[in-house]
Amino acid sequence: MENVSLKTIATRLQLSTATVSKALRDSHEISAETKERVRTLASALNYVPNPYASSLRRKISKTIAVVIPEVADSFFADAINGIETIAQSKGYHVLIYLTHESVEKEKRFFSDLQSGRVDGVLLSISVETVATEHIADLQRHSIPIVIFDRVCDDIKTATVSTNDYEAGYAATKHLIENNCKKIAYLSFSARLSITAKRMQGYKQALADNNLLLPDDFVVSCSSGEENDIAAIEQLLLLENRPDGIIASVEKLTTHVYVTCQKFGLKIPQDVAVVSFANLKTAPILNPPLTTVTQPAFEMGKAAATLLFKALEKKNFNLNAEALSIPSVLHVRDSSNKTALQKIQI
Amino acid sequence: MENVSLKTIATRLQLSTATVSKALRDSHEISAETKERVRTLASALNYVPNPYASSLRRKISKTIAVVIPEVADSFFADAINGIETIAQSKGYHVLIYLTHESVEKEKRFFSDLQSGRVDGVLLSISVETVATEHIADLQRHSIPIVIFDRVCDDIKTATVSTNDYEAGYAATKHLIENNCKKIAYLSFSARLSITAKRMQGYKQALADNNLLLPDDFVVSCSSGEENDIAAIEQLLLLENRPDGIIASVEKLTTHVYVTCQKFGLKIPQDVAVVSFANLKTAPILNPPLTTVTQPAFEMGKAAATLLFKALEKKNFNLNAEALSIPSVLHVRDSSNKTALQKIQI
């Protein structure tokens, strides 16, 4: 197929390319008659504007980037769907970058994004991200950033999060009310704000109820599947074995259930379990899983909405925005033998 | 921050922008000394090349698009991870477009992609895609396309699929060997190649074993969650109720389990269940779920590998490639009471 450019149209109509370009952009400098001739030929030739050329002119890529650790997690899958609903309504493309929890990849992405490939960025930081200079660098290039879920106080911009502290507290209080006295916490990485806040809530609930927290009851699980399973096995082999477990990320659920089964431990009789998870299968697990469910779809929508406000209103102050959308505790059999409960945290 | 362009560097060094551009591209036309001066200043000013400008010149966006129906499905999440491993090793970005099963969205994406925003496309078609003119249009713009999983015979290009016919046959044969005589099939959309092939395998296995197939045993489930649940309830309320169910897509699993529970039907005693699914939680469901598991990660890798062959070798013939990577039947309690089995299909 012939590559139809502005010049092709200009040559055929004996006009300048500038005139053709202005006609296609509906400029007031061009007569209605000329516009009509240009549009008719452009349509007949199936002319498609080159987005790189128009980006150079208008500096609008009509694309936003979503930089996240992974998609194999129901939270991010649901959040992306929330982001997409807003982006599509604005006629924007969504570029999804996966860091796979590597800060080096995150830095490389942010360096690439400096060049104007996207108009704005939605970010949930990697587990390795401590220094945030690469993020500030992109902001200095006038590209707005909104951070969701995994926020970072060092970065001055809008955030959309959930009430992680209260959720950690509520999950722990719930286990205590179900007669757990020895509650362990499977941390993902204490460096991450969300894990740290959930853990603070957990610790405060223990303290408020005069429960002890042995050192080996906080288990770090972020060193790969095999190590995570080994750490969970070690926890459940302790002489002073916990009678309740809070898993701070969804993917640990399967490991906890399989390990309990392997050791002949009954859930919830021997060990009660609560997971931070958006798993659709939570109600059909054996036993059905009590979850702290994050409002993933709503968080994605809210983050994208803030980003578009920054893109559309020149003086919109992103720094002033810090949204928190509450999580929900869905009580099921893994922690409880009474009827199904749903607790707004 | 000052926007550093080629012109900034050229002005400061009293060179032409063409010279600066050539120096940065390591042209043989430029002396080693000038290259050194240009690079030193570019580095000091933190100069980033504009990708749109260089795309215009080189027609390489260093980006591939992945056009898929959704990410809230373990198959696509795993496939994206496979694609990413290849793309990142090639220094490419991955743009993910979600059609949400709408052919209108798919067409709009393909129309946008004509402009050269990406160098190549990995596609799994939407459930609504019958006519494929929008895909052929993009091929005529010399953008290579590889189709994976949800293939379409009308499109002349490379495909990466799994052995869906054999998988449907194996799932059905397995249920027959476990004493099921009345096996129903939850179809997603018979228009999709994968569903059609799985269903052909199912029908052939029934015929080979002289089992009847009542009309109401093939249930179409693609009209939204509520309708899907209603259709599954209707199936399980039939006077001639099935004693085995094959779910052709992962997301139907929860509906089947919840409906069985609602009607007091035991899995597998009353109804045996097999799902086409990549769910990580399959082993911890109540009961553990027998799955036909697709090699999602490997399919993503293979599709991306073929696409890069087309991008890197000018005369590589994509039409000649049609890979099939076999699925695996993981037998668990939902269909069987013997020990765990793993059957290569």
Image: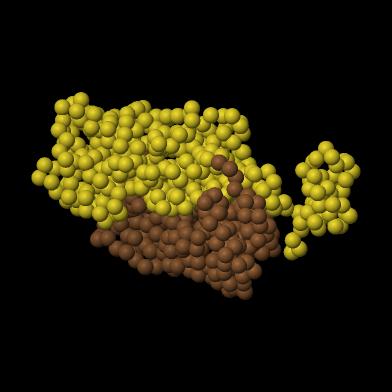
Chain colours: A brown, B yellow
Residue in the image at 49% along x and 48% along y:
B110
Q: Quadrant of residue B4?
A: bottom right
Q: Nearer the viewer, residue A124 or B317?
A: B317
Q: Nearer the viewer, residue B94 or A295?
A: B94
In the rendered image, residue A318, in percent from the top left (x then y), is placed at 59, 70
Residue in the image at 56% along x and 29% along y:
B316
Position of the C terminus of chain B, as image quadrant, is top left
In the rendered image, residue B187, in percent from the top left (x then y), is placed at 27, 42
Residue extending furthest top?
B208
Q: Taking the image as drawn, is residue A125 in sight?
A: no
Q: Is residue B133 above or below residue A162?
A: above
In the shown orientation, is residue A59 left or right of residue B253?
A: right
Residue in the image at 16% along x and 30% along y:
B211
In the rendered image, residue A10, in percent from the top left (x then y), is placed at 64, 54
Residue in the image at 47% along x and 56% along y:
A80
Position of the N terminus of chain B, as image quadrant, is bottom right
In the shown orientation, is residue B17 left or right of residue B112?
A: right
Q: Taking the image as drawn, is residue A48 in sight?
A: yes
Q: Nearer the viewer, residue A45 or A91?
A: A45
Number of labels in the image equals 0
Q: Quadrant of residue A332?
A: bottom left
